[in-house]
């Protein structure tokens, strides 16, 4: 039987928010079966809990932000991606500000933190959201068209296409795919960093975004080239980061997905629209568990034992 997972012990770290620039402490704690992933603003009195939920997402400008009665926790997607990639079902995430720290701009720091905590199987059966028929959302027309689609699949695979019309991005590969029955999240996706363009920085900071961004936590590009002296971690790191984001955004549905995800120039907003479209159609999905090993989806059966190395 595939079982639910949490962490063995409490761990903590500190960092700064990518968009707010605010210093924040992050504490991860084990959680009981069937409690899900819950963010908690412990800087508030009394503390406010915000469950990871597609319906709870408000602002999607440059990040996914959970909102509840005026309280926010933003930039949750990288930590959610690490939880999805390592098969963590139940977790309490305490933060001392309204943004999850950006760390190095990827999910690798969160993978390392979860590794330090250790993973523990729980007594309850792991629950999956199984997509039963295709769900798609679209926006724009012609060259500006964006879309994202979920289709039935006994496992979890993602395919993404980007198009930025930038020489450094276009030259690295604009498509990538990953199937977790064969590919390791830790090796293939976790180290892909977020990225941004110098010409957009002043505009973003003018609306309260990217105040904590630097070459230490993002790939930064001018009009022609990558400014980071060490270059890229993956040949197609840009599109791999979009897959990393999508994994985190999609995990906000509350369960690991049994689905194929394909997207063309999607982002946080469209990923959330896709989940809402799915949840609005109860006949398009069901919640399942697996007892017999022969029926278990390979994409999830080996998560607890996957290679930890981030190098």
Image (tube, grey):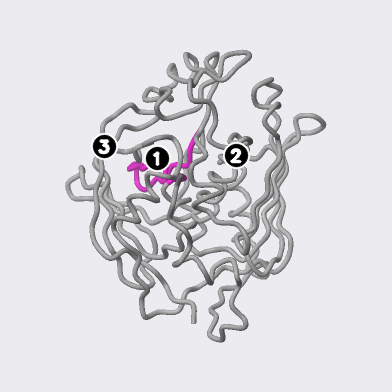
Residue plotted at (37% across, 73% down): 121
Secondary structure state at the residue bearing disc 2: loop
Q: Residues within 10 Å of mark 3 (few under 14, many from 20)?
A: many
Q: Is residue 205 above or below residue 132?
A: above
- Pick the residue in front: 50 or 17: 17
Q: Is residue 18 above or below residue 184?
A: above
Circle nearer the N terminus (3, 2): 3
Q: Residues within 10 Å of mark 2 (few under 14, many from 20)?
A: many
Q: Specify the farthest residue to the bottom.
A: 292
Query: Which residue is disc 2 drawn over?
Result: 267
Residue plotted at (42% across, 45% down): 108
| Part of the protein shown in magenta | 62-78
- Pick the residue in front: 214 or 211: 214
Q: Is residue 291 above or below residue 21?
A: below
> Is residue 156 located in the magenta-colored stretch of the structure?
no
Query: Which residue is disc 1 drawn over?
Result: 74
Q: Is residue 245 above or below residue 217?
A: below
**Residue 140 horizontal/vertical position (percent):** 74, 34
Residue plotted at (25% across, 50% down): 27
Circle nearer the N terminus (3, 1): 3
**Residue 134 horizontal/vertical position (percent):** 74, 60
Residue plotted at (47% across, 47% down): 57
Give the distance between the C-alpha atoms of the residues marked 2 and 1, in whole angstroms.
15 Å
- Residue 201 falls left or right of residue 97: right
Confirm or deny contact between disc 2 and disc 1 (CB under 8 A): no
**Residue 75 horizontal/vertical position (percent):** 42, 40
Residue 24's tag is 3
Circle nearer the N terminus (2, 1): 1
- Pick the residue in front: 164 or 48: 164
> Is residue 66 located in the magenta-colored stretch of the structure?
yes
Give the distance between the C-alpha atoms of the residues marked 3 and 1, in whole angstroms.
12 Å
Q: Specify the farthest residue to the right.
A: 142
């Amino acid at each position: 039987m595939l079982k639910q997972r949490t962490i063995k012990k409490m761990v903590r770290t500190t960092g700064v928010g990518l968009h707010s620039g605010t210093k924040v402490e992050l504490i991860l704690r084990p959680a009981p079966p069937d409690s899900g992933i819950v963010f908690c603003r412990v800087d508030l009195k009394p503390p406010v809990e915000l469950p990871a939920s597609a319906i709870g997402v408000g602002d999607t400008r440059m990040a996914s932000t959970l909102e509840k009665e005026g309280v926010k926790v933003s930039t949750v997607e990288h930590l959610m991606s690490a939880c999805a990639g390592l098969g963590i079902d139940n977790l309490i995430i305490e933060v001392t500000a309204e943004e999850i720290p950006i760390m190095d701009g990827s999910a690798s720091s969160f993978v390392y933190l979860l590794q330090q905590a250790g993973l523990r199987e729980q007594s309850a059966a792991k629950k999956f959201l199984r997509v039963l028929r295709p769900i798609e959302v679209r926006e724009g027309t012609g060259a500006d068209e964006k879309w994202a689609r979920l289709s039935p699949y006994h496992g979890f695979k993602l395919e993404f296409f980007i198009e930025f019309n930038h020489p450094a991005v276009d030259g690295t590969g604009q498509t990538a795919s990953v199937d977790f029955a064969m590919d390791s999240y830790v090796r293939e996706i976790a180290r892909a960093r977020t990225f941004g363009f110098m010409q957009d920085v002043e505009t973003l900071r003018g609306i309260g975004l990217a105040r904590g961004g630097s070459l230490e936590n993002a790939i930064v590009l001018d009009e022609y080239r990558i400014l980071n002296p060490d270059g890229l971690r993956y040949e197609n790191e840009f599109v791999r980061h979009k897959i990393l984001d999508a994994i985190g955004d999609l995990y906000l549905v509350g369960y690991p997905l049994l689905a194929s995800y394909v997207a063309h120039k999607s982002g946080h907003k469209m990923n959330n629209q896709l989940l809402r479209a799915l949840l609005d159609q109860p006949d398009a999905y069901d919640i399942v568990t697996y007892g017999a090993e022969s029926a278990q989806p390979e994409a999830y059966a080996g998560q607890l034992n996957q290679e930890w190395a981030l190098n």
